Image (tube, rainbow, N blue to C red):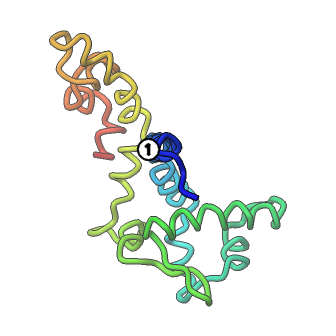
Amino acid sequence: MALPNDDIDEMNKTREVLHAQAYIWNYTFNFINSVSLKCAIQLGIPDIIHSHGQAMTLPDFVDALSINNNKAKLQDCIYRLMRILVYAGLFIQEKEGYLLTLTSRLLLKDEPNLSMIHYIHAMFDPIMMDPWHSLSQWIQSYGDQPTPFAITHGRPLFEYTREDTGFSCLL
């Protein structure tokens, strides 16, 4: 027995709404990749795997972190973090353990000509992140300040970096 047209239309509308909600959820949670990358750098994950010299198992990896905590809980947290990072393409997970990708090699501290760590630290610094929270304010008051950065910090980026040498060396 076929469904009445009204039921089919209702099902299609429901699918469309669910698709639209999923689209919004995707945008809402896009920050997870960025903060997971930041966490990986702060924990030194790329360097730990690199110094291991071969695929690194999760238990070896947790031990190498030298975090005095409940190892089972820590292992679960690291597993979840690594799932995000593997899915994002920053690391490879094989049966033997985790490996670096070309992308994660750019996160090594001992690669002075290739490392992007300083850039990433700068981009995740509150000095650079806070202006994004002023984007709508900047649009609403366009003309008063040239950028959201200037709204947040009272002066343009390059003027700010001339005065804050600690931050300017990150750029």
Residue at (49, 68) in percent of width and height: 87
Q: Position of residue 28 (x, y in %)?
A: 47, 40
Q: Quadrant of the N terminus?
A: bottom right
Answer with left or right where residue 81 lies relative to residue 112. Answer: right
Above or below, 129 relative to 54: above
Q: How many numbered marks have been drawn onto this rendered protein structure?
A: 1
Q: Is residue 28 visible?
A: no
Type of amino acid at the residue the image marks with label 1: Glu
Q: Position of residue 156 (x, y in %)?
A: 21, 24
Mark 1, residue position: 16
Q: Position of residue 124 (x, y in %)?
A: 42, 43
Q: Nearer the viewer, residue 70 or 30?
A: 30
Q: Position of residue 15 (x, y in %)?
A: 48, 47
For the view shown, which residue lies furthest in the front direction? 1
Residue at (26, 27) in percent of width and height: 160
Quadrant in the rendering for residue 104 = bottom left
Answer with left or right where residue 75 lies relative to residue 40. Answer: right
Q: Is residue 159 visible?
A: yes
Q: Nearer the viewer, residue 136 or 35?
A: 136
Quadrant in the rendering for residue 56 = bottom right
Residue at (66, 67) in percent of width and height: 79
